[in-house]
Image (spheres, grey):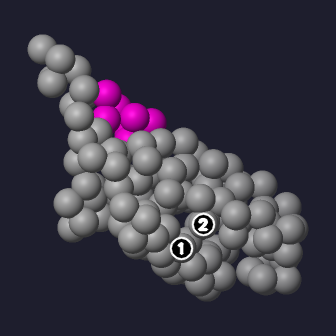
């Protein structure tokens, strides 16, 4: 059985998650038109790139902090939560914050939900694969 993550480790992962969200929010402010208002292909490409990026970041962060694969779900949730809370405010004030049309919040929200769903599914798969390997 793996040991629990310390409060300090959880705090580091939460801060990393907030930093990722903040850098994404700034990027969307300046590049949102290309990502979300250039048609379905732009949204699809953005969604895939963002989902792949957060999964790679999860792996890199866990390696850097020495978290085990069995802790992947916990780490993913802790990293995702600051951005999910931040996105509530971001979406509520979307046109004001981004300078984009209000309806652009719809593809933005879809990309955010997709990226978080892929991250959590990836973390669950990573943790479950480790558990099954240990049981065999």
Residue assigned mark 1? 18
Mark before the other along the chain sequence, 1 or 2? 1
The local secondary structure at tag 2 comes to helix
The local secondary structure at tag 1 comes to helix
Left or right relative to 16: residue 5: left
- Residue at horizontal 74 percent and vertical 80 percent from the top: 98
Q: Which image quadrant for residue 85?
A: bottom right
Horizontal and vertical percent for residue 61?
A: 29, 64
- Residue at horizontal 61 percent and vertical 77 percent from the top: 25
The reply to whether the magenta stretch includes residue 6 is: no
Q: Is the Cβ of the residue at disc 1 closer than 8 Å to that at disc 2?
A: yes
Of residues 113 and 49, the one nearer the viewer is: 113
Give neighbour class at mark 2: few <14, some 14-19, many 20+ (Cα, 10 Å). Answer: some
Q: Is residue 115 above or below residue 133?
A: below
Left or right relative to 68: residue 72: right
* Magenta range: 121-128
Cα separation between marks 1 and 2: 5 Å
Residue assigned mark 2? 82
The reply to whether the magenta stretch includes residue 125 is: yes
Image quadrant for the N terminus?
A: top left
Horizontal and vertical percent for residue 125?
A: 34, 32
Image quadrant for the C terminus?
A: top left
- Residue at horizontal 31 percent and vertical 28 percent from the top: 128
């Amino acid at each position: 059985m793996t040991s629990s993550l310390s409060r300090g480790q959880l705090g580091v992962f939460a801060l990393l998650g907030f930093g990722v969200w903040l850098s994404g929010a700034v990027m969307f402010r300046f590049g949102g038109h290309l990502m979300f208002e250039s048609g379905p292909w732009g949204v699809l490409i953005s969604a895939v790139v963002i989902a792949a990026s957060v999964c790679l970041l999860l792996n890199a962060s866990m390696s850097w902090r020495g978290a085990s694969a069995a802790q992947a779900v916990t780490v993913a949730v802790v990293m995702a939560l600051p951005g999910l809370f931040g996105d509530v405010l971001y979406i509520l004030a979307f046109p004001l914050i981004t300078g984009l049309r209000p309806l652009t919040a719809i593809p933005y929200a879809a990309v955010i939900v997709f990226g978080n769903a892929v991250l959590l599914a990836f973390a669950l798969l990573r943790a479950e694969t480790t558990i099954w390997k240990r049981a065999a």
